Image (cartoon, coloured by chain):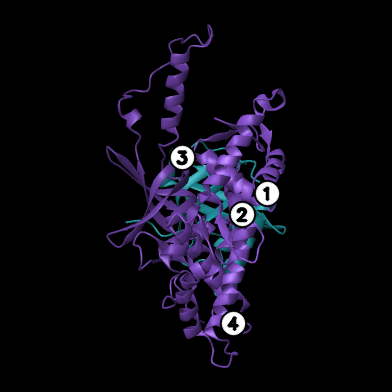
Amino acid sequence: MAVNDPGGADADAEEPPSMLWGLDPVFSAYSRLYITDILRMKESRQVPGVYFYKNHPLFQVDVLGTVVYKRERDDFYCYGVDDSTGVINCLCWKDEKWRDQGEPTKCRDPSGSSRGFNIEDELKRLKEAERQSTQLEIGDLLRIRGTVKTSRDAREIKATCFYKVSDPVMAVQISRMLEMPQLYRKCYDEPFQMPSDDLGGTEAGGSSHFHYLLSRSVLTLKEFLSEKEVARFRPYDVEFLLHPLIQSSSAEQESDQPRTSLATQIRKLLKETLSVLQDEGQIFRKIRTQDEVYNVTEQDKDLHTAIKDILREDTKREKYAEKGCHVLHILSSMRQRYSQNLSREVLEVALTFLECKSDIISTTEAHYIVL
Amino acid sequence: MLPPPAAFYFPLEINTDLVKDGASVRTFGRLTSYVPEESKAVLSGQQSSAQCHVSVQTTLVEPFQPILGAQYFVLGEIEKTDGLSGVILHARALTCVDGVDLSLMQQAIVEQRRFFKERET
């Protein structure tokens, strides 16, 4: 029978790249692993301090177990915790506020009859209770949440939160024992799905490849338009931006795919890109003529002025004075005044832009007034 | 420095060959006798109408409040002598857990074992 090595299996297999770790929900959570797995996890080669269980990156754990070893220093407790699968050392720092406590103070009113709510006494009692919950003896049940550390070849947990669990009828331990296998099955033993698996550059049909290209080209164009503060352009002005994308992708394409000419590919990509940007409202055609001219929403000063004028004039009227103008009202006014082809998306992009510049402000989700 | 982990065993299994000499175990049972002078206690378990007894050496966990008839949880090392004393559990931790749901506890132990067995394959 092969040696059981769940955490380190496929140790030679590639670790997922560290850029993608945040996509794994396990990475951000305090994982409830068996101590035996925590002890056997492999440390990442990319970032020390992060460990892998199967291919899940993690560095924080949540453990419940019996204290079987105790060592106390001035600043911290070191508890050895046994959850029946393994034993691990837990470093539990003492809280600053208890250092000055000294003797646990007695209640000022020894007779027991409470003459009202004395806040100082209650606070002292609360602090004392908190302190007691961190002082454990061998045999007590400890819950600890913390980061995994390896020091001097020994793995240990540095606690961010720890406390003594009161479990008189073992209900907490029993429910944990029942819950862990389910967590493993549903979560930790399920492989971490990385999104790059979906992109598949050389898939037959290449439609996913095209989508990838499209998203790259939309981003490239957006960045160019905003960096160069382009207010208006024609398609052939920006065609050059797509050349590097097509060239690098055709280098990867399979030789048996039909070879469309570079020019056709570029034209197709450009057409789709402009269409996406129009749908998003980032660009628009003011006048529909043979001449294909696009205006860039965030750079079109005339558009902004027209919007502000409408708001200024209409908020003088009593009807709109307090609440402001609704988006649809602005849209119909703009269509009369500025361009018949204006879409709601374009208007919303412009309104958001103006609001970010603090020229206008939204009074409700769909109403605006000028400042 | 750290003691070895103590796996869960049913009281019936303690006296069998399932548990090796020197192994660290966790188990539970009803306290039926306690002799403080010798630091010896006996926990009894009932499983499918079979009574079984586990002898516990309580030197390390004294003093404790003995409640005869109550359920106790114990963690410690097994000592198997071929002589008359039989199997002794040297307790490192002994806690009263009277009121524990025994059938649920049994279910939990079985579930955990089943999971570990699945992993090995």
Residues at badges 3 and 1 in contact (C-beta under 8 Å)?
no
| Mark positioned earlier in the residue sequence (2 or 4) | 4
Q: Chain B, which colour?
A: cyan
B53 sits to left or right of A61: right
Task: Give percent across and percent down for residue A278.
Answer: 62, 59
Q: Amino acid at mark 3?
A: Tyr
Q: Which mark is residue A344?
A: 1
| Mark positioned earlier in the residue sequence (4 or 1) | 4
Q: Which mark is residue A281?
A: 2
Which of the chains bears the disc numbered 2?
A: A
Which of the chains bears the disc numbered 4?
A: A
Q: CA distance from mark 3 to mark 1?
A: 56 Å
CA neighbours of label 2 inside 10 A, class few (<14), some (14 to 19), many (20+): many
Residue closest to the eye, A194 or B93? A194
Residue closest to the eye, A126 or A254? A254
Q: CA distance from mark 4 to mark 3?
A: 53 Å
* Both labels 3 and 1 in a single chain: yes
Residues at badges 2 and 4 in contact (C-beta under 8 Å)?
no
Q: CA distance from mark 2 to mark 4?
A: 31 Å
Q: Which mark is residue A138?
A: none
Which of the chains bears the disc numbered 3?
A: A
